Image: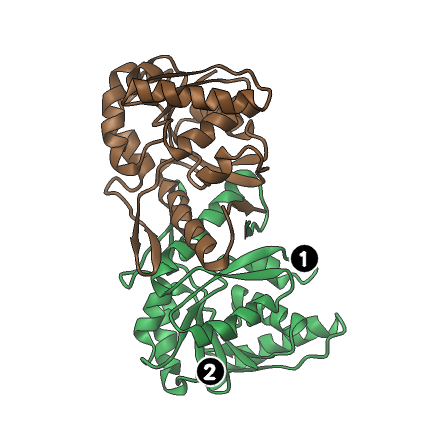
Chain colours: A brown, B green
Amino acid sequence: MRIALCGGTGDIGEGLALRFAYDTDHEVLIGSRDPEKARTKAEEYETDLDGRGTGTTIKGFENAMAADRADVVVLAVPPYHVRDTVGSIADRLDSETILVSPAVGMQRDESGLHYNRPSAGSVTEMVAETAPEDVPVVGAFHSLSAGKLANLDVELDEDTLLVGDDEDALDVVRPLADGIEGLRALSAGSLENAAEVESLTPLLINLAANNDLHDVGVRFE
Amino acid sequence: MRIALCGGTGDIGEGLALRFAYDTDHEVLIGSRDPEKARTKAEEYETDLDGRGTGTTIKGFENAMAADRADVVVLAVPPYHVRDTVGSIADRLDSETILVSPAVGMQRDESGLHYNRPSAGSVTEMVAETAPEDVPVVGAFHSLSAGKLANLDVELDEDTLLVGDDEDALDVVRPLADGIEGLRALSAGSLENAAEVESLTPLLINLAANNDLHDVGVRFE
């Protein structure tokens, strides 16, 4: 399968790119608004993986070109760029392309980070609102620490929560997430359940800060 | 220390009463609007503990009488009874009594349970708004499964998240929570962080339903 990481030059994009490339046989494409930056980063990731004896090819493209080639498009961009990014790739999407949303809106005050719920209900629902109607949207990977993902020396042992209304799309994304070693995908329900899933991210960051937990993840058991 | 469980005849009250009585040396008081019901339930809990060789005394009282005698008062009532319960015990509280709020407002639709955020921001903040100003309020025990707590044959291995603005009160509640075997208290910040903590509860219930996880708890690591 081909996975495009739009915003794949950012920190969560880097982490997912490296894990997918290292742990699975899927083809990873790096997308960026700036194709030159995408190519440079893709080469960096290849070099990192080469150093680990994994001769994987990772290619960089402008976001729409990456999305055009992909079966699954991960919107690894900050929440305030989600609408623009979906708009810029919309005509490359169709019912055969799954859009995956890992972004979370947060705001900081003196008590730490808070979930900043968008008017759509959640960032994942905002993606579904913005994307062409026939494009299936799945929320996933919200609670993963970018730093931990990007450091392949760190063994993961945590859950990621999936939300979506399209069962076929969920059946594609679930094994994709489970394919990352040490990651377990759990079903958190429909798109309407995305707010509670996204709310976990500021909670995790606050817990890490308040309890000296480094790169904290979550397990449900 | 004396712990009063207002609404201690309900399911989360029962679970906390049994765990505190079995795992710690604290004195447990059961509160209810109906003192007769409180006494009957307290006797039931005593019988359960006697059967396990723990000769603990648990007494039942009307809520205000239980609160009057306690160092820590847990509001183990449904969210829609929280204001009334705090009102009914308010004149028995002072700066030496810590109010603990485990309640979560939820509503169900076809996609499962959702967090129902009260206008105060969270149930924990609603308690702080309703209680006399000098009474310290701590949010805790939100994500614990009542059924698992009440079954002493089940070993716990999960976290509970504390929120509060009063450090002295947190320093009392933290060891209280840690005193329950298999439970680890983590600091989730101030009262303003309570919404993200309370949001975990509908998420846990949905995850249990969607993934065949029974009495699911959460670990952050």
Residue at 56 percent across and 72 percent down: it is B176
Residue at the top extreme, as displayed: A69
Image mark 1: chain? B
Residue B154, labelled with which disc? 1
Tag 1: amino acid: Val
Q: Upstream in the sequence, badge 2 or badge 1?
A: 2
Q: Nearer the viewer, residue A69 or A135?
A: A69
Is residue A200 visible in the rendered image? The answer is yes
Q: Nearer the viewer, residue B81 or A116?
A: A116
User: Mark 2 and 1 residues: CB-CB less than 8 Å, in contact?
Assistant: no
Q: Give left or right: position of A163 versus B173.
A: left
Is residue A135 visible in the rendered image? The answer is no
Image mark 2: chain? B
Which residue is labeled 2 in the image? B67
Q: Count up the numbered dots.
A: 2
Tag 2: amino acid: Ala
Mark 2 crowdedness (10 Å alpha carbons): few <14, some 14-19, many ≥20? many
Estimate the x, y position of residue A83 in percent, counting from the top left.
24, 31
The answer to which quarter of the image holds residue B22 is bottom right
Estimate the x, y position of residue B188 in percent, counting from the top left.
44, 59
Residue at 38 percent across and 80 percent down: it is B135
